[in-house]
Image (cartoon, rainbow, N blue to C red):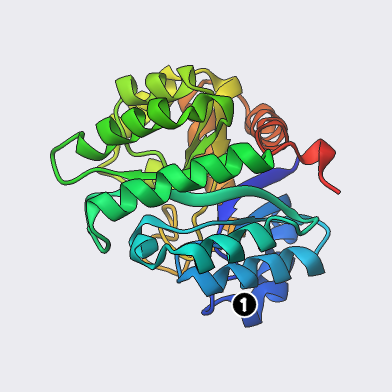
């Protein structure tokens, strides 16, 4: 039985020096693959994810501009992103998207940055890793995301909505546009009953699992620094929701991760 953590920031500045040890613990826990996500710590930090993927054969990388950093988007950032996409271990653009909860970048900047990355992904032939977080008690970011998807032709690109926290209607709208759904440790939180109902209602063959390390450690590790070894707990929770074995869940989500990121074709 082996698991695939489809979203972990192990190339982030605070984890990069420990990446080897973190991956050793993941392998000991049965994790056979990790997607190192470069975005989220400033545009330059994408290099850390690429470096980890270059050094470890069971790690692949994504590069992109997080909505928090959308104000940094400019022609130089675009050229840097396109340069990283030439690396043989880079398999996706992202994470990119919209975050109306924190609004670290203006919403119009977030929307423009997302639309540009969708166009780059289509031009370069890469799937997308999407971040979507609405403001409290609202569906605003979800509605804008779907609008931008439709305007930019994101269904021609596809990819994954990572760390899903939306409702069932939003999940179904994403699936219809060619985007799979990935669940994180939030699924195990006591106050995530509604999210568990959404996860149980979705087709298992379109689901992925992740940690979003170093954030969002699942129960019983909540409050600790998260790492890929803990993805096993997410798998156990999702398997229980679908009334299936952890072995089947691990196989299904691993196969879907390979499919979503076209890892069979990765050089």
Establish if 106 lies above or below 121: below
* Residue under pointer 1: 16
Residue sitting at the far left: 137
Q: Is residue 127 visible?
A: no
Q: Is residue 66 visible?
A: yes
Crowding at label 1, few (<14), some or many (≥20) Cα neighbours within 10 Å?
A: some
Q: Quadrant for the N terminus, please.
A: top right
Q: Is residue 12 left or right of residue 137?
A: right
- Total count of labels: 1
Residue 10 location in percent, x, y? Answer: 60, 67
**Residue 59 location in percent, x, y?**
74, 57
In this view, the residue farthest toward the bottom is 17
Identity of the residue drawn at 44% across and 53% down: 218
Vertical order, 170 against 55 (above or below): above
**Label 1 secondary element:** helix
**Residue visible at 59% across and 63% down?**
79
Near-viewer residue (254 or 219) = 254
> Residue 21 lies in what quarter of the image?
bottom right
Residue at the right extreme of this rendering: 267
Query: Viewer-proximal residue, 97 or 72?
Result: 72
Q: Reply above or below: 167 against 28.
A: above
Instruction: Please name the residue shown 67% across and 28% down the image.
Output: 252
Which residue is drawn at the image coordinates 69% and 32% (left, top)?
A: 247
Taking the image as shown, residue 247 lies to the left or right of residue 131, namely right
Q: Residue 78 lies in what quarter of the image?
A: bottom right
Whole-percent x, y for residue 178 in the image? 54, 23
Q: 62 or 248: nearer the eye?
A: 62
Q: Residue furthest front?
A: 75
Q: Is residue 126 left or right of residue 237?
A: right
Report the front residue among 55 and 24. Answer: 55
């Amino acid at each position: 039985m082996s698991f695939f953590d489809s979203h972990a920031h192990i190339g982030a500045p605070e984890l990069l020096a420990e990446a080897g040890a973190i991956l050793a613990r993941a392998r000991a826990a049965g994790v056979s693959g990790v997607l190192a996500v470069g975005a989220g710590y400033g545009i330059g930090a994408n290099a850390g994810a690429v470096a980890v993927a270059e050094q470890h054969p069971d790690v692949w990388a994504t590069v992109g501009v997080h909505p928090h950093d959308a104000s940094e988007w400019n022609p130089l950032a675009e050229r840097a992103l396109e340069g990283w996409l030439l690396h043989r271990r880079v398999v996706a653009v992202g994470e990119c998207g919209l975050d109306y909860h924190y609004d670290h970048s203006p919403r119009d900047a977030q929307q423009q940055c997302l639309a540009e990355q969708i166009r780059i992904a289509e031009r370069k032939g890469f799937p997308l890793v999407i971040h979507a977080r609405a403001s409290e008690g609202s569906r605003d970011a979800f509605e804008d995301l779907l609008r931008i998807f439709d305007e930019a032709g994101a269904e021609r690109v596809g990819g994954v909505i990572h760390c899903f926290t939306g409702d069932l209607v939003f999940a179904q709208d994403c699936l219809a546009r060619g985007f799979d759904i990935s669940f994180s440790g939030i699924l195990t939180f006591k106050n995530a009953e509604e999210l568990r109902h959404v996860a149980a209602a979705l087709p298992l063959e379109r689901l992925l699992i992740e940690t979003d390390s170093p954030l969002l450690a699942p129960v019983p590790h909540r409050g600790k620094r998260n790492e890929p070894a803990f993805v096993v707990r997410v798998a156990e929770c999702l398997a229980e929701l679908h009334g299936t074995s952890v072995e089947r869940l691990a196989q299904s989500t691993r196969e879907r991760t390979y499919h979503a990121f076209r890892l069979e074709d990765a050089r």
